[in-house]
Image: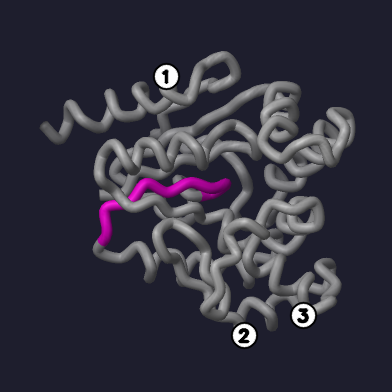
Amino acid sequence: MIIAIDGPAGCGKSTIAKMVAKQLGFYFLNTGSFYRAVTYAHIRRGGDCTDRAACLETARSVDISVRDGDIILNGEDVEDRLHTKDVDMNASIVSSDPELRILVTDLIRRIASGMDIVTEGRDTTTEIFPDADYKFYFDASPEVRARRRIAQQGGNQTYEEVLDLICKRDENDRNKALGALKIAKDAVYIDTSYLTIREVCEKVVSVVRPAHC
């Protein structure tokens, strides 16, 4: 079974998806982390993230897998390095290349094959797993998401800087040629702005469990 969740940055997708996966006994898969891994690898090589051909070459040359929910890059667990300021600023640029998205989508589908998963990202319900058993779209205001991101990452950036970054990320994600952020017609919409993580998790589980008792 595939439970797919989409939504903008900072709306709680990863935290809630992990909780849902644990509660249901499913595997958690963050699709956005694959693009972050390519971005991190390209930055580490000293590459220019606006150079699409070079980014695509990086994506083709690295080995990305998943272990216990963490991203493994060339045999190394890099999960804790995928949310730095540099990766945040460039991941949306890197992931906007349609050819690179096709490559990463194929990889994600291979990894997920034959598994019960809870997966989340930007185009999980529309492009990667359009036939997912259950689809959800999480949302929250940019201001709420900026405050959450600061609480998550600490005080390295001001509220204004984080809010500006989130707004730019939203604009870029919604205008991608392939894999644009949008609400699938059959997705359950949940505004997480003023809900606790537990409350959102319960909403998701309440939709899934009755149909599979």
Label 1 – label 3 distance at C-alpha:
43 Å
Q: Residue at x 55, y 68 (%)?
A: 77
Q: Nearer the viewer, mark 1 or mark 3?
A: 1
Residue 206's image quarter? Answer: top left
Query: Residue 114's x, y, as percent?
Result: 25, 63
Q: Which residue lies most toward the top here?
A: 194
Q: Is residue 194 visible?
A: yes
Q: Give the secondary structure at mark 2.
A: helix
Residue beneath label 2, please? 61
In the picture, measured across the screen, residue 14 lies left or right of residue 54, that is: left
Q: Residue at x 68, y 80 (%)?
A: 58
SS at mark 3 in the image: helix
Mark 3 Cα within 10 Å, few/some/many (few <14, many 20+)? some
Q: Which residues are magenta?
A: 115-123
Residue at the spot 26% in from the left edge and 53% down from the top edge:
116
Badge 2 or badge 1: first in the primary sequence: 2
Q: Which residue has dot 1 on it? A: 199
Percent position of residue 209, x then y:
21, 30
Mark 1 vs 3, N-terminal side: 3
Q: How many discs appear?
A: 3
The residue at which mark 3 appears reads as: 54
Nearer the camera: disc 2 or disc 3:
2
User: Are the residues tagged 1 and 3 within 8 Å (C-beta)?
Assistant: no
In this rendering, position of residue 111 left or right of residue 87: left
Amino acid found under the numbered disc labelled 2: Ser
Which quarter of the image is occupied by the C terminus? top left
